[in-house]
Image: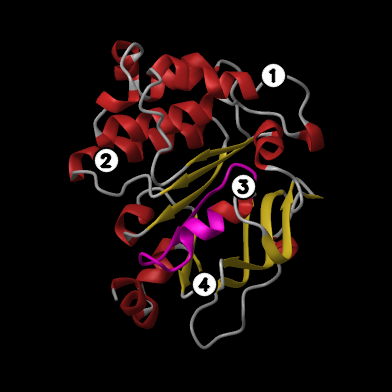
Amino acid sequence: MNAIGSAPPPPAEAAGPGTVLALRDVNTFRGPAHVLRKVSVSVRNGETVCLVGRNGAGKTTTMDSIMGLLPVRSGAVVYRGREITALGPYLRARMGIGYAPDDCGIFPDLTVAEHLRIGQWLAPGPRAAGGGSAVADPAGAIYDLFPELRRLLGRKGLHLSGGEKKMVAIARSMALRPAVLLLDEAFEGLAPAVVNRFADAVRKIQAMGISMLIAESNVMSAAKVADRLYVIDRGEIIFDGTPAEVFRHEGVMRTIRG
């Protein structure tokens, strides 16, 4: 465990064998603002890692840096042992990195079925760097996660509820047959009963052997699904360890709660 006042977290490569995705000392800017400051995180094969922090702490910037939606000023993004820092977002997707963004990214004039076809369109073709997927039957996996999507296939994005949009965003990324899935604020804005519903979906994805990195503001929601978590504050990683460990660290918990 690393926390406030202790040594900084180790480089991503030092996270142990079987690391599928890692950031190493990443610095990222949004315009003139220096948002990420030497961020190092890692996700191992089949592991669910949560990145926890308050709004504005740098969670979405971390996700955008992994996907190539924001340029990394320095440091490296590594996927299955290959540095992908300079690759375009669509190439990262074709390698097997799925992404459900915090705003869901739903097109108002496309139907649910058309959104799913976007993922299917990106998925074909050989994947570089051993980016195979544990999802042999994407359609079956999607409807097992969210059976209600069957009745929504003809509905346009404009007419989806917030929870339905989150389902479609995750389903679209699953249609890609990902090896790694990035979920940004998957539980935000949902009623407690719906949070439990999405936590169940995450556990089903875990059972498929898919690695996940989940950005989350609520540490209680993160603890429902995380094998391990990082806490980010003001663009710096201030803790890494298990959910049980973070609850025992009063300083980190105060930071999370603001």
Q: Does residue 49 show up magenta in the picture?
A: yes
Q: Amino acid at mark 3?
A: Met
In the drawing, does residue 78 fall left or right of residue 214?
right
Q: Please tell me which residue lies in front, 74 or 210.
A: 74
Q: Which residues are magenta?
A: 44-63
Residue at which label 3 appears: 67
Q: Examine the rendered structure and indicate whether residue 43 appears above or below residue 182.
A: below
Q: If you read the primary sequence from the N terminus, does the residue marked by circle 1 or circle 4 appear first? A: 1
Q: Examine the rendered structure and indicate whether residue 171 appears above or below residue 1.
A: above
Residue at which label 1 appears: 124
Q: Residues within 10 Å of mark 3 (few under 14, many from 20)?
A: many
Residue at which label 4 appears: 235
Q: CA distance from mark 1 to mark 4?
A: 36 Å
Q: Amino acid at mark 1?
A: Pro
Q: Examine the rendered structure and indicate whether residue 12 appears above or below residue 257.
A: above
The part of the image, by quadrant, that contains residue 55 is bottom left
Residue 6 placed where, x, y %?
Answer: 56, 85
In the drawing, does residue 118 fall left or right of residue 19?
left
Q: If you read the primary sequence from the N terminus, does the residue marked by circle 2 or circle 4 appear first? A: 2
Residue at which label 2 appears: 196
In the drawing, does residue 209 fall left or right of residue 188?
right
